[in-house]
Amino acid sequence: MENINKLRKFYELKKIERANSVSCRKESSAEHSWSCLILADYFLSTMKTKLDRLRVYELLLYHDVVEIEAGDVCITEEEKRKKKQEMEQEAIHILKEKIPPAMKDKLVALFTEFEEMKTKEARFAKAIDALDAEIHELDYKQDWKGWTEEFLRKKKGPLFEEFPETKEMFEKIMAYLKEEGYFNQI
């Protein structure tokens, strides 16, 4: 039961709310992780660049686990983002003591690889993480109030440069957002 109870710590990701809407509630970080996996699977099945599929899946599976302790920080929360790295490092330290021992090293390694983006798989996973929110929010135009094209391009655009297929999708979404009046809503 000890390991079962420690595994349950991961289930708390279902309780962490993100800024994105889902019907009349907010999306959980667990739901976001799942849709990132689906999006990654699509690209890994269609793109020319070959990546370690399992590594990408693992990176995405674990990338937001720190939010169990640190919470989610929206891209627009500039003050909170200044402390994000520090909060997440503290969270990883706390989390590794609350999960099964067999998973401690894996959690730390995957989280570090994702954040440092030194591997091609980590950079791809980061691009998927960024693209997922844009695709998800196409159903919630009201959530785009106050957003600008310039802000989104500055914050997320560089993540797609290395992977032409993600960049092409990002550009198609940007054109759609502009055409449909998602930006600069009053």
Image (cartoon, rainbow, N blue to C red):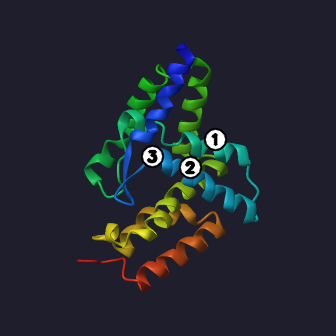
Q: Are marks 2 and 3 in contact (CB under 8 Å)?
A: no
What residue is rendered at 62% in x and 20% in y?
A: 102
How many numbered tags mark residues here?
A: 3
Residue at image position (39%, 68%) is 140
Along the viewing direction, whichever of 132 and 155 lies nearer the viewer: 132
Q: Residue at x 51, y 75 (%)?
A: 173
**Which three-letter amino acid code belongs to the residue tagged 2?**
Trp
| CA gap, disc 3 and disc 1 | 15 Å
| Vertical placement of residue 179 versus 67, above or below | below
- 2 and 1 marks in contact (CB < 8 Å): no
Is 46 above or below relative to 124?
A: below
Q: Amino acid at mark 3?
A: Ser
Nearer the viewer's eye, disc 2 or disc 1? 2
Q: List the residue tagged with mark 3.
A: 29
Q: Which badge, 3 or 1, is on the more N-terminal residue?
A: 3
Is residue 86 in view? no
- Say whether disc 2 or disc 3 marks the residue closer to the N-terminus: 3
Distance between the Cα atoms at labels 2 and 3? 9 Å
Marking on residue 137: none
User: For numbered disc 2, what is the local secondary structure?
Assistant: helix
**Mark 1 neighbour density, 10 Å: few (under 14) some (14–19) many (20 or more):** some
Report whether 136 appears left or right of 87.
Answer: right
User: How far across and down, in percent of the image, does residue 3 sit?
Assistant: 56, 17
Q: Is residue 45 left or right of residue 161?
A: right
Q: Which residue position is annotated with label 1? A: 58
Q: Residue at x 41, y 24 (%)?
A: 94
Which three-letter amino acid code belongs to the residue tagged 1? Glu
Q: Which mark is residue 34?
A: 2
Name the spot of residue 11 as percent of width and height, x first: 48, 34
Q: Nearer the viewer, residue 130 or 30?
A: 30
Q: Position of residue 133 (x, y in %)?
A: 46, 60
